[in-house]
Image: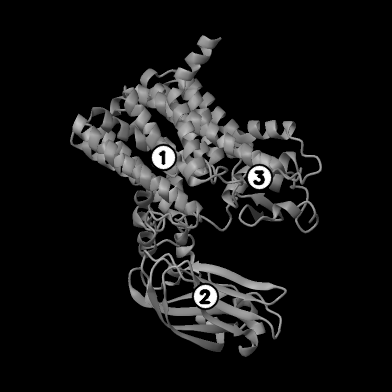
Amino acid sequence: MIHKITSIFRFFVSELIILLLLLVVIKHYIGEVDNHIGLADGKGYYEYLPSTFIRHDILRKDFKVTENESLYKEVQTIGVYNFYKDHTVNKYTCGTAILQSPFFFYTYFTTDRSGKADDGYQSSFQETVYFATLFYLFLGLFFLKKILQLYEIKWPVIFFAQLLIVFATPITHYSHYEASMSHVYSFFAIAVFTYTSILYFKRQKAIYFIVACLILGFIFLIRQVNVLVLFSLPFLAGSWVEFKSGLNSIFSKPKWLVIGVIGFLSIVFIQLLFWHIQTGDFLVYSYQNEGFDFLNPEFINILFSYKKGLFLYTPVLLLSVLSVLIFTFSMKQYLAFTWLGFFLLITYVFSSWHYWEYGCSYGSRPYIDFYVLFFIPIALMINHASIIWKSLIVLVSFGFIYVNIVQTYQYKEYILHWINMDKAKYWTVFLQTDERFKGLVWKEPIIESNYRVVDEKKIGDFTIQKNNNQILIRINTSEISEFDLVSIIQLKIETDFNILNKSKILISIDDSLENYLWDERSILHFYNSRLNEFHTGSFNYKLNSVKKSENVTLTILSTSSNMDFNIQNAKLIFLKSKNESSLHLEQ
C-alpha cells in the first residue's frame, strides 16, 4: 500500500510541488479571498448548478417573463442573463459547470445548510469552486507534462515549463481570485485535446481520434470560440507528411469519422438542451447584442496595449515568439510557420471581439486557454539551448515570475485598474505594492459641466512638517452655501508629488451624533499630471446628504507625514449636481 502511494506521488510529484508553491504564494503574499465566484462571467459559468439543483428555475421555456415574474426573480442578474424573445437565457455555456459538478454535489450533500440562505453561493460553495479549479489546474499541468514527454523534453525543462505557466502567467490569478472563470478549465481541456491529437498523428489509432472529438465537444461547452484549437492540428502533427497522413487515415475510414462527429455533437447537444429548456429553442445566440467585428480587429492593442496587452501583462510569452524565430533559422520552418499561423488566427479572432479588452479582468485572458500551445515551443527551445542560453532564459524567466506575482497582487489590491490602465498609470504603479498606491489609478473624474460651484473656501499655503499631524482647516458647515445639497467636495492643492512621500490628507465631516464623511488619502492620490513633479492636484470626495445643523464641522488635516513638504494655494470647492443623474462620478 505504501509502495503504491509512493509510486503515485512520484508520478505526480512536479504537479504537487507546484500546487503547494501556489498555495504558499497565495497565502503569504498575494492574499487569500473569501469569494471565488466572481460577478458576470464567473458567476454565469457556475450559475447552471444552483439554478438547476437548488433554485429549480432553469426550466423556463413554458413561462414568459411577463407572465411569471417570480420564476425569473433570481435570473435577472445583470451580465449573466440576456433577454431572448419572451425568456431570459444564460449567455455563458455550461461546460465549466459540468466540470465543477462533482465538487458541487459533494458540498451539496455533505454540508449542513439548514437555517441559512441556500442559494449555492455560500462560503462552502465558494471554497468548492476554488478546489475544483485547482484540481483542473493540476490535471492541466499533468497533461502538459505528458505532451512535452512526447517531444522528448528533459524532466527539468518540463518542470520549469510547468512552473512558468503557473507563476509567470495570469493563471496565478484565475486559479484563485476569479476561480469560477472558465480559463483554467479550458486550459485543462485543450491540454487533453493536444495530447490525444499528437498521439493520433503519431500512431493513427481510432481511439485517439474519437477521444479528441469528445474533448473537442467539451472545449465547445466550456467556451465556444475555443474550437479554434482545430487550427493547431498542422503544428501538432509535427510535419506536413504526418498531417497529410493523419487526414488521409480519417477520411479513408468513414466509420472513424462518423463516430467522432457523433461523439462531438452528442457533447455539444448538452448545451443545445440547456438552451431549449430555458427558451424553447435549440439554437440560440446567447450573447445577443455582442459579437465580432472582423473588419476592425484591434490587433496591436490586444498584443501591446497598456490596457490589456498580451505581451505587456504576460511577457513570458515573448519566449514563444523567440522560439519560433529560432525554429525559422534552424531548419524547423514547418513548426515555425504552422505555430505562427495559428497564433495570428486566434489573435485576429480575439481582437475582433467588440470588446477586445474582455471586460474587467487581469491580462489578456482569452489566450490563457491556449497556453499549452505557447509552452510547447518554449520547452523545445530551452531543451535544445546551450548551457549559457539556458541560464539566460532561466534568469529572465524568474524576472517574469516576479512581475506576474506582483501584478497579480496589485490587481487584487486595487493598484492596477481592472479596465482603465494606460501608459502613465502603468508606469506610475509599476511593481509598487505599498498601501498608499492602493486606489491610486482608480481616481474617478467628474464631468465638470454636470456640476455647479456653490461655494469655495481658501485654505492657503502650509509647510507640512515631518512626523507631525497638522490641521489645515476646520470650519462649520453652516458657513458653506447650500451645503445640504453639496454632492462633491473637491480639494485642490499645489505641491511636489514626490513618490517617496507617505503623507496623508484626512477629511472628516461630523457632529456630536453622526459622522458623514471620513476619508484618509495618501498625498499621492491628489496628483493629476505625474508623480515627482510640482503641479496642481486634486481629489473629489463624494458626499452623501448632510442634514442642516449648526454643529456639523468639516476638518482637513495632514497625517503620518514622513518628510517636510510645502502645500500652496490649497482650497475647497463645493459642487452641487445640476441634475439627479449626474450625482454619480464618471466611471
Seen at 37% across and 64% down, the residue is 500
The residue indicated by pointer 1 is: 167
Q: CA distance from mark 3 to mark 2?
A: 47 Å
Q: Is residue 282 visible?
A: no
Query: Looking at numbered disc 3 in the image, what kind of residue is underneath it?
Result: Glu
State if disc 3 and disc 1 touch (CB < 8 Å). Answer: no
Nearer to us of marks 1 and 3 is: 1
Q: Classify residue 580 by image quadrant.
A: bottom right
Measuring from the top left, give residue 573's x and y in whole percent. Answer: 52, 84
| Horizontal relation, residue 400 to residue 136: left or right | left
In the image, residue 525 sits, relative to residue 96, either above or below, namely below
Q: Classify residue 386 by image quadrant.
A: top left
Q: CA distance from mark 2 to mark 1?
A: 42 Å
Measuring from the top left, give residue 486's x and y in whole percent. Answer: 62, 82
Nearest the eye: 178 or 573: 573
Q: In which quadrant is the N terminus drawn? A: top right
In the image, residue 431 sits, relative to residue 449, either above or below, namely above
Nearest the eye: 498 or 355: 498
> Which label sits on residue 47?
3
> Which label sits on residue 128?
none
Measuring from the top left, give residue 374's x and y in whole percent. Answer: 36, 38
The residue indicated by pointer 2 is: 557
Nearest the eye: 563 or 87: 563
Mark 1 or 3 closer to N-term? 3
Seen at 67% across and 39% down, the residue is 124
- Tag 1's secondary structure? helix
Query: Looking at numbered disc 2 in the image, what kind of residue is underneath it?
Result: Leu
Q: CA distance from mark 1 to mark 3?
A: 29 Å
